[in-house]
Amino acid sequence: MTEAPVFDPPESALASARRAADRGLCPECYGRLFGRLGHGLTNSERADRLVEALHLPPVAASADCPVCGGLFSRLPTWVERTVRAAEGFEWHRFTCGSRWDPERLAREEALWIEVGTEWGESARSAFNRELGKKVAAATGADGVTEGPDVVFLADLPVGRVELTVLPVYVRGRYRKLDRTLPQTRWPCRRCRGRGCNYCGGTGKMYATSVEEIIAGPFLKATGAEGSRFHGMGREDIDARMLGRGRPFVLELVRPRSRTVDLAAMAKELERDGVGRVEVVDLAPSEAIDVVRVKEATPEKSYRVGVAGDVPVAKVNEALGLALSQAIAQRTPKRVAHRRSDRVRTRRLVAARVVEAAEGRFTLDLRTEAGTYVKEWVEGDDGRTVPSLASLLGVPLKVEFLDVLEIHDTEG
Ligand SMILES: [Zn+2]
Ligand SMILES: [Zn+2]
């Protein structure tokens, strides 16, 4: 049910309307001088009411309207351009904007002052709204201010509609079972992705990655131009990622189709990832989840295989000591090329020996986010203090490392 229109212009508004009457404005622009007066009427209807009250002839449509230059009478053309701009894309929610000649907008504000109206509405916001209404009517899509699938920008001076397609986001958790697989696509360090002899023309250091395996079916299903992979941290290439898996958000860039059958994707991933990657808990996601996974600092549990000739009683003693003090870690040598060199303080939350044999032992550790476990065990040439090796007074070597759990939620 629509409310009855209310429009009861005071004397001062009528006086302004009289002053504006001979300016050659089109009905939309004339009525819009009083666009914030009353409600339930279009601006053209406001124009009708005003001239009636003033006993003036009806306002005629004009291609020479000094404010809009006939733009509002050409709205159907802009609706067509808008709908055409998004052809080939699936969209249900949209936002309209427009780019104007700033002089035209300034002229309109000058006119408000000249005729003395305090109710003027800008041509830009009226155009955006009217275009939005008509696009919604023509397509059945919803005009929204938040969370659109596409954004249209009508470039009025150029006569063209620019289209922005918002990404589709999917979240989930992955387990990585393969110790040769990087998390993300790793461009060749010699050619930076162009393809050279070093990388066998692939442009990559590794044939594939967790990112590429997971993105594959989604790229196919959505026709997206590309993807971005946002993991809640990352494990080393040679570390497995076990337990409930690592949370991630997959961002599909400029997708043609937005309706993703997650059950079908899960099935394809089961096949594509076999023996390498397992994906669980797939769910629709949104941009804010990217921030959430990037900013999370969950504790992590690891299983570490260590080579070192130490009696297990000594290891237990050292772990007790390690749990009671903070660890100072200078940025490890192996990541110094991409991280700033500084000292971070971290803590072990739990540590125990799960297995011991001649010359080697296995530990389960739980650490604060950002602890470099390999370096904590081996010492990184004195850059991590104390390290397990320094506490034991013998050299140690990590033989394998698995992430057992990311404790982002209870579990
Ligand atoms: Zn006009
Ligand atoms: Zn290369």
Image (cartoon, helix red, strand yellow):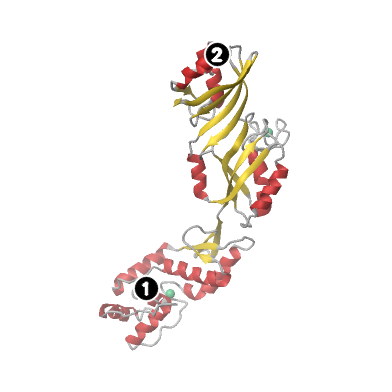
Judging by the rendered image, the residue that carries numbered circle 2 is 313
The nearer-to-camera label among 2 and 1 is 2
Q: What's the residue at 47%, 17% (across, down)?
A: 321
Quadrant of the picture in which ligand 1 is shown: bottom left
Q: Which mark is residue 35?
A: 1
Q: Quadrant of residue 175?
A: top right
Classify mark 2: residues with Cα within 10 Å, few (<14), some (14-19) or many (20+). few
Give the residue type at disc 2.
Ala
Q: Nearer the viewer, residue 112 or 262?
A: 262
Q: Nearer the viewer, residue 182 or 265?
A: 265
Give the residue type at disc 1.
Gly
Q: Nearer the viewer, residue 85 or 169?
A: 169
Q: CB at mark 1 closer than 8 A to ligand 1?
A: no
**Residue 140 seen:** yes
Image height check: is 173 above or below 14?
Answer: above
Image height check: is 140 above or below 179?
Answer: below
Q: With 399 as the anchor, is 144 left or right in this view?
A: left
Classify mark 1: residues with Cα within 10 Å, few (<14), some (14-19) or many (20+). many
Q: Position of residue 201 (x, y in %)?
A: 72, 36
Q: Position of residue 358 (x, y in %)?
A: 65, 13
Q: Position of residue 362 (x, y in %)?
A: 61, 21
